[in-house]
Image (cartoon, rainbow, N blue to C red):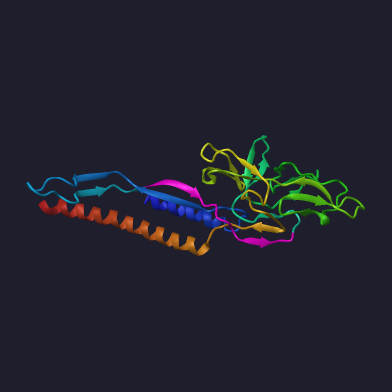
Amino acid sequence: MIAQQFQIDTISNNLSNVNTYGYKKNRVDFEDLIYQHKVMAGTPATAVSEIPTGVSVGHGVRPSATQKIFEMGSLQSTGHKLDIAVSNSVGFFKIQTPDGSFAYQRDGAFKIDSNRQVVTSNGYLLEPPLVLPRDGILETLAISENGQVSINIGDETRPTVIGQVELYRFLNPAGLKAVGKNLFRETAASGAEIPGTPGLGGFGSLLQGFLEMSNVNLAEEMVNMIVAQRAYESNSKAITTSDSMLATAIQLKR
């Protein structure tokens, strides 16, 4: 029952983030517990034969792992100049957090602060830093598929390149540590970051004016929730039935 409650908690978190940009759904992996072997398979039955299967009873289940599924979410057109999506599942944006460390995210809903720096919704800086010129015309901001950022400055008719958006990937993205605020942190399991240019070396291209939505499938999660609920109820019934059978056995002497 505890294992099924853990499954429900995971599904609930997935459902609550169905509209979170760049969210990656969680999956719970289960494993069975230790077995009590009453009769071992291969035990001699007669002088010329042996028991083929044995008699064993298991002792339940437990969660063995939770894993982020880094499948590509659907793309939503926004038309906003600083909304950026990655065209496939390979590539994270690198973010500098307030303590000076770095984190990574798929959420491309960037904004401009009072210093004209490109930041996340929480005010964290994009890395490498991208600062728009004071006399730059935001309406002319263009981000190419390979991450080159250009803008018209003042009365100039030709755009000026002001920076580059880089992407980063990991050998084992499932090993990244989710820390909230749409951020992931590098761990020993994920391996070190591998920088790259969008559109090259397997990295996805950048799509300006688009956002990647959550990859949560509502129908799939609802089915999983119903299965977990029925499993929880069945386990509860098994406990009640076992208790009733034991009570019957105890009352035989009366």
Q: In this view, does 230 lie above or below 28?
A: below
Is residue 74 shown in magenta? yes
Write the residue at 59% across / 58% down. Answer: 73
Report the residue at 50% width, 64% height from top.
219
The stretch drawn in magenta includes residue 229: no
State the residue in front, 146 or 244. 146
Q: Give the image location of residue 254, x and y in percent.
A: 11, 52
The residue that appears at 31% across and 48% down in the rendered structure is: 60
Q: Looking at the image, is 222 positioned above or below residue 167?
A: below
Q: Residue 55 vs residue 65: left or right? A: left
x, y percent for residue 136: 86, 50
User: Bounds of the magenta span?
Assistant: 62-79
The image shows residue 3 at horizontal and vertical percentages of: 39, 50
Location of residue 107 in the rendering, given as x and y in whole percent from the top left corner? 64, 51
Q: Is residue 113 visible?
A: no
Q: Which of the two residues, 220 or 196, is positioned nearer the viewer here?
A: 196
> Looking at the image, which residue sits at the far bottom?
219
Q: Is residue 215 above or below residue 94?
A: below
Q: Is residue 220 visible from the viewing direction of this image?
A: yes
Name which residue lies at 52% across and 55% down.
14
